[in-house]
Image (cartoon, grey):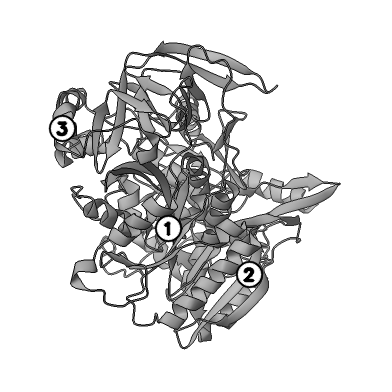
């Protein structure tokens, strides 16, 4: 993922010109001339910006904005920046990564600062999706307060519980902001009900009496206002974020810091660029740091002791103010800053004065729940689209990702393969998408759940799932989830929405892999599903039949309309005429989900075989030849298939492919194509393997 800190340096033209030409191993893509121009311009930018900075920690307020996905965090940050005079070039200004703007979600945490009534507010925007919970865990320790954003219509959901638990663990006293109160379905009674639900959530998570006495504000981030009392239409002079910013200054305490102690900073974020090297971001725990000071990097060893890994000088100190980065000469305890000059420290390490020999304790993250294996693309079509093909380059890219994202673990395997552990298929899907955009070709295995064993008992990760659907879809959704070992814990109507039902369930993580696409189909796109990791529980047993068989190609060449015409009746196709195919490539889904054992037979339009797959999948594998062309005779002429009409194929996104493939299959990822294939391409070997598995 590209570093968000310096991305505002580029113009749109520079971004476009560098999007396809820079090295894939560096997260940030900066031009040398742009950075030099930035270095020369920062002095004037700082002079024209907010008031001159002070080292007094009493003027600082460090606060994180936390919420469930789609509850309005990023829109709220836009309104706060505008309220404080920042120039917002576009909506969702904090979402600076291309994938964030394309998908409308926040992927990485970002820090900025604004000035309000002689106070400097360091604001941390955090992701709301459960798969990116590691971003919340590693930055919540930098702040003394939090704004908990809750949709007044939906109330607290699965991820609300996760982010609130992290905030309460660090002793923060959140400010509750009920957002979207301008909706017609939101009334004052509904806001009181949501406030009671949030209070119960605080109590269930073990909040202290001080934390239970949280202030409540009402807002419409879309309209750009916040109020301390419930209202649908505030006065014209109150249609702003002043009351929210005043509440931050009032209820969030200044950092407890000592400027006279030696300099200490725990690295919470890291980026790279060509000119400055590593840019380390963190909160200064104590002391003062200035440009040119000698500092050292420390880390804790496995035995608990501290070791020095590097000693260097501070080359540059920076701070993001609004949407602009400015250079600063010095920073004091309690402030959140960026520094350049060190080349070895990374996230979780300590940067300190040279006389300090003890590292700060690193942030402990929740363990990953799923893993996938990344390997070299060894299909017959390998090397046609990408430029980064070798296992060494794939390994370097994955290790670089693990260095900047502590929620991802990379374990080298055999045959130039790497096991990548993460929080969910969306998080690993974002990593794969970034790699394919950087020119990588690779093969990816289906996700596997990370099990635990305690007291000789097998445990598996369980997730809390909250679903909102129309009443007519309740039966189909519950039937599908019953095959995935889900258990319903609560069921009731959605307040303010007639004909809608809310289901609360617990389901194994393995059962939810690939279910989102099925859920969208079952609910005709009208349902909402939210999930978050809950705990480890006893293994619930094997899943039911959750997928049908597949159509597997037996030919190498270009797919023709003539051959696909005879296959449409046998299932759903994933390919269209003109694409390349090879032996072992999956080109569609079979219409049946039972095991069949049929010998070879001939068809006028294609060659077919149905074989028994691995017993673990209970599906049907149909061998087909999609490249067979129409035979020519001296009676009729070749009309090049112009009279053949085919149904549109089912085109899978990367996330859908990750959830679809079975354990004996792989995803072939290239910059231009996403293909599904069998792990073993030879049909004879696959048949012998399936027989051994059956025996």
Q: Earlier in the sequence, mark 2 or mark 3?
A: 3
Q: Which residue is mark 3?
A: 47
Identified at 29% across, 37% down, the residue is 320
Is residue 455 placed above or below 598 in the rendered structure?
above
Q: Nearer the viewer, mark 2 or mark 3?
A: 3
Q: Which residue is mark 2?
A: 505
As drawn, the residue found furthest toward the bottom would be: 498
Residue pointed to by mark 1: 652
Q: Is residue 671 visible?
A: no
N-terminal of the pair, mark 1 or mark 3, is: 3
In the rendered structure, the answer to whether residue 23 lies left or right of residue 456 reads left
Between 331 and 337, the residue placed more toward the observer is 331
Cα distance between the residues tagged 1 and 3 = 51 Å
Q: CA distance from mark 2 to mark 1?
A: 27 Å
Query: Is 256 situated above or below 576?
Result: above
Query: Mark 2 against mark 1, which lies toward the viewer?
Result: 2
- Number of residues whose C-alpha sits closer than 10 Å to that of mark 1, classed few (under 14), some (14–19) or many (20 or more): some
Tell me the element at label 1: loop
Identify which residue is drawn at 26% across, 50% down: 93
The mark that comes first in sequence, 2 or 1, is 2
Q: Residue 266: image x %, image y %?
A: 49, 29
Point out residue 101 in the picture as x, y percentages from the top left corner: 30, 52
Q: Position of residue 523 (x, y in %)?
A: 48, 76
């Amino acid at each position: 993922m590209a570093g968000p800190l310096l991305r505002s340096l580029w113009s749109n033209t520079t971004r476009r010109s560098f999007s396809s030409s820079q090295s894939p191993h560096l997260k940030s893509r900066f031009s040398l001339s742009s950075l030099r121009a930035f270095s020369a311009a920062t002095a004037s930018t700082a002079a024209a910006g907010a008031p001159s900075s002070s080292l007094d920690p009493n003027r600082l307020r460090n606060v994180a904005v936390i919420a469930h996905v789609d509850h309005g965090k990023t829109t709220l940050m836009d309104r706060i920046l505008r309220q404080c005079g920042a120039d917002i070039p576009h909506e969702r200004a904090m979402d600076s990564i291309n994938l964030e703007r394309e998908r409308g979600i926040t992927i990485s945490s970002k820090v900025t600062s604004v000035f309000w009534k002689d106070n400097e507010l360091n604001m941390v925007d955090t992701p709301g999706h459960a798969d990116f919970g590691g971003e919340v865990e590693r930055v919540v320790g930098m702040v003394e307060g939090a704004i908990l954003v809750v949709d007044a219509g939906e109330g607290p959901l699965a991820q609300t519980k996760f982010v609130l638990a992290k905030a309460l663990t660090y002793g923060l006293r959140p400010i509750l902001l009920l957002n979207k109160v301008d909706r017609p379905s939101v009334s004052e009674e509904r806001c009181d009900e949501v406030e009671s639900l949030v209070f119960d959530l605080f109590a269930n998570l073990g909040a202290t009496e001080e934390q239970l006495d949280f202030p409540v504000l009402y807002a419409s981030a879309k309209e750009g206002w916040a109020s301390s009392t419930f209202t649908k239409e505030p006065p014209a002079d109150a249609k702003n974020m002043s009351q929210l910013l005043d509440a931050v200054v009032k209820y969030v305490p200044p950092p407890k810091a000592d400027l006279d102690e030696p300099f200490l900073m725990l690295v919470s974020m890291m980026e790279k660029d060509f000119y400055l090297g590593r840019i380390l971001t963190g909160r200064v725990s104590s002391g003062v740091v200035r440009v040119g000071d000698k500092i050292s990097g420390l880390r804790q060893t496995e035995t608990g002791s501290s070791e020095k890994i590097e000693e260097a000088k501070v080359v540059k100190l920076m701070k993001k103010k609004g949407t602009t980065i400015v250079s600063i000469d010095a920073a004091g305890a309690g402030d959140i800053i960026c520094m350049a000059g060190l080349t070895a420290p990374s996230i979780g390490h300590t940067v300190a004065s040279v006389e300090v020999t003890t590292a700060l304790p690193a942030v402990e993250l929740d363990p990953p729940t799923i893993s996938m294996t990344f390997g070299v693309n060894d299909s017959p079509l390998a090397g046609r689209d990408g430029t980064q093909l070798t296992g060494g380059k794939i390994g370097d890219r994955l290790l670089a990702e693990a260095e900047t994202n502590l929620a991802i673990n990379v374990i080298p395997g055999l045959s130039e393969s790497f096991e990548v552990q993460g929080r969910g298929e969306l998080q690993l899907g974002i990593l794969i998408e970034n790699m394919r955009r950087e020119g990588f070709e690779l093969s990816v295995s289906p996700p596997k759940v990370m099990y635990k064993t305690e007291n000789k008992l097998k445990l598996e990760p369980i997730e809390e799932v909250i679903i909102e659907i129309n009443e007519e879809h309740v039966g189909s959704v519950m039937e599908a989830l019953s095959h995935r070992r889900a258990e319903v814990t609560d069921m009731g109507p959605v307040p303010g929405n007639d004909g809608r039902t809310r289901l609360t369930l617990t389901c194994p993580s393995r059962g939810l892999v690939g279910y989102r696409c099925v859920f969208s189909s079952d609910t005709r796109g009208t349902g909402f599903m939210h999930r978050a990791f809950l705990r480890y529980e006893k293994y619930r047993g094997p899943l039911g039949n959750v997928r049908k068989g597949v159509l597997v190609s037996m030919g190498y060449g270009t797919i023709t309309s003539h051959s696909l015409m005879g296959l449409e009746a046998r299932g759903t196709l994933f390919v269209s005429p003109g694409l390349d195919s090879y032996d072992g490539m999956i080109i569609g889904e079979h219409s049946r989900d039972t095991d069949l054992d049929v010998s070879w037979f001939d068809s006028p339009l294609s060659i077919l075989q149905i074989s028994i797959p691995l017993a673990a999948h209970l599906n049907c594998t149909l061998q087909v030849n999609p490249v067979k062309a129409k035979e020519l005779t001296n009676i009729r002429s070749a009309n090049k298939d112009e009279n053949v009409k085919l149904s549109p194929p089912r085109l899978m996104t990367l996330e859908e492919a990750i959830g679809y493939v079975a354990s004996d299959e792989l995803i072939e990822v290239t910059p231009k194509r996403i293909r599904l294939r069998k792990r073993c391409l030879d049909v004879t070997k696959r048949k012998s393997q399936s027989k051994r598995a059956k025996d």
